[in-house]
Amino acid sequence: MNFYILSVIIFSILLIPVSFASAAEVLPDIEFRDAIFSSEKPDSDSGIYIFVEVVQRDSNGNFVSFIQSDKMTDLNPNTVNYYVDSRAQIMDIPVYNFGGQLIQAYGEKFSSIQEIKDITASTLLVVEVADTNSNEVKRQLAARFAHDGFVMAPGDVVETHWFIARVLN
């Protein structure tokens, strides 16, 4: 009897089709897409710590989902430093002294209203960086948090809270 159940499970695994989606085909901007899929892996020696919280609410304001983590699948320290430095030019970002080590802490909330039914399994911090050689502004991936994902319906509000701490000395 157990052999029969085991053989049905193995047979089902081999024959049931599974579909996969590629985000590279969905992202329209080729240069931006290439930046996402060729970004650096997280470096623990970069002196940067990033924490993200994603909150989803439906069109009535009811809580739907919450995801949080500090496990980034991609992290570009240069872009993160550029982003925090540019924000520090327009606002006062606090610096804390922990036993002689200076830590700058910054947090920002982004909010968007979903227009179509969609599914997401990745949260991105994308920064507009001015090219020093030309007057062009390019979008660069600063951090990517890949997660299990959630389904979004039209009218859903997704709030992303990014928290960045970096060592200054």
Image (cartoon, rainbow, N blue to C red):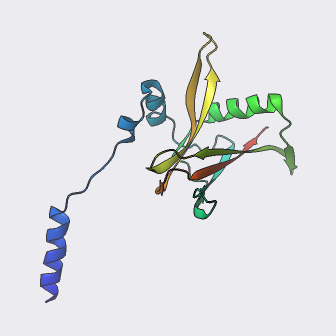
**From where the camera sits, is residue 100 visible?**
no
In the rendered view, tell whether residue 130 sits above or below residue 95: above
Where residue 97 sits: x, y (%)? 87, 47
Residue 24 in picture, x, y percent from top left: 38, 36
What residue appears at the point 42 percent right and 26 percent down from the top-left corner? Answer: 30
Which residue is found at the position 74% from the left and 28% from the top? Answer: 86
- Residue at horizontal 39%, vertical 41%? 23
Q: Can residue 36 be seen here?
A: yes
Q: In the figure, 131 relative to 71: above or below?
A: above
Q: Is residue 90 left or right of residue 165?
A: right
Quarter holding the C terminus? top right
Quarter residue 6 falls in: bottom left
Residue 144 figure quarter:
top right
Q: In the image shown, does 113 or 160 lie closer to the viewer?
A: 113
Viewer-nearest residue: 126 or 152: 152
Which quadrant of the figure has residue 34? top left
Most extreme residue toward the bottom, as rendered?
1
Taking the image as shown, residue 34 lies to the left or right of residue 87, namely left
Labels in figure, total:
0
Lateral position of residue 16 relative to residue 111, left or right: left
Q: Residue at x 20, y 66 (%)?
A: 13
Percent position of residue 139, x then y: 56, 27
Across and down, in percent, residue 11 comes to 14, 70
